Amino acid sequence: MNTATSRTTSSRTATSGTATFRTAVVRTPGGPDAIEIIDVPVTEPGPGQVRVRVAAAPVNPVDLGVAGGFFHAAGLIDQPAHTGLGWEFAGTVVAAGPGAGLAPGTRVAGLVDGFDRDFGTYAEQLVVPVTALAAVPDGLDLVTASTVPLNGLTAAQILDLLGDAPAGANRLLVTGAAGAVGGYLAALAPERGWQVTGLARAEDEEFVRGLGAGFTTRAEPGWDAVADTATLQEPALALVRDGGAFVGVRPNAVPAAERGITVAVVMVHPDSSRLSGLLARAASGGLPARVHAALPLDRAADAHRALAKGGVRGRYVLRP
């Protein structure tokens, strides 16, 4: 088993005395009903790693794709035994390897990226490199903090791909602006000189405008740049002016460039320093961290079903 896993309330098997922890996996993908909670051995952190007792792990659309087999079919997952679920988490350091620099008791949040792995953050414990973590500021609860890493870093890295807004060509349309990535992006993009308009449903107007962005339910072509957090794909590309910029969020489905448009796709990766700043902004109210409901790990399948129904603003978070 990949050593990037571990456990929270360690138990010991009756036969071997080995400490184990519970984690959610998928053996044969098939949607929420394919999710299993299994016991796996506790591993100790190596150099530059810590073992974290997980307090909260959000459910993301990418997790539904893993459980449903989308990424297996795309050739991005090839695990012989089982595939772990979950990308982001928050919790408390319980053990530190040599050179980790984080003492036990430190509250942290982090990101575990990549599809092809047998472990995930839907777990009682997790062993991760400190480069994937940032300390959680005082005043920010761990459930809320857990919702920041994946979508916050995705938004920040979309901005890295867009760069600073060109003078006189700074009109940015964010599709799905009321969603988690879109909301963060709308809040962060003005710092890079972008004039943001959010594309969302009519009932989300108050939220989007509250981020300081413009709002529309129907966009016409001619935008200097489009950040397609709603994964509209080609219809979103068609909204970009000739010579403009498009950034998508589906690494396995990049629209073909046309009309001189620069096309890029974000592939989110851990960034401890950037995550630290995002958590500080969430603590001060500068990022819209929204939690809809917290459920126990045993109800991971229920959380997947609820997210798949749509219509909810705010995150489902698992509490191992």
Image (cartoon, helix red, strand yellow):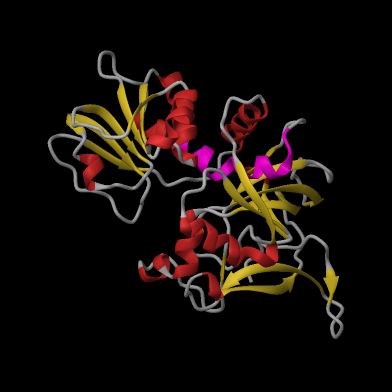
Q: Position of residue 6 (x, y in %)?
A: 73, 63
The residue nearer to you, when weighing 112 against 312, is 312
Position of 72 relative to 195 (above/below): below
The quadrant in which the C terminus is found is bottom right
Q: Residue at x 56, y 78 (%)?
A: 81
Q: Residue furthest bottom?
A: 15
Please indicate, yes or no, whether residue 97 appears anywhere in the rendered image.
yes
- Number of dots carrying numbers: 0
Compare residues 298 and 112 and report the one nearer the observer: 298
Q: Which quarter of the rendering shows the N terminus?
A: bottom right
Q: Is residue 82 above or below residue 176?
A: below
Q: Is residue 188 above or below residue 45?
A: above
Magenta segment:
140-155
* Residue 188 in picture, x, y percent from top left: 48, 26
Image quadrant in which you'd find residue 158: top left
Residue 51 seen in this snapshot? no
The single residue placed furthest to the left in the displayed view is 259
Give the farthest residue toward the front: 203
Q: Residue at x 43, y 25 (%)?
A: 189
Above or below: residue 262 compared with residue 70: above
Q: Is residue 149 magenta?
A: yes
Specify the principal SS of the magenta part: helix
Q: Position of residue 169 (x, y in %)?
A: 25, 19
Nearest the viewer among 303 and 237 is 303
At horizontal 19% and vertical 28% (from top left) the residue drawn is 222
Residue 225 location (% of width, % of height): 28, 30
As for residue 92 lying within the magenta part, the answer is no
Question: Is 92 situated left or right of 240 in this image?
Answer: right
Quick one: 116 or 198, which is closer to the camera?
198
* Residue that appears at 48% across and 71% down: 31
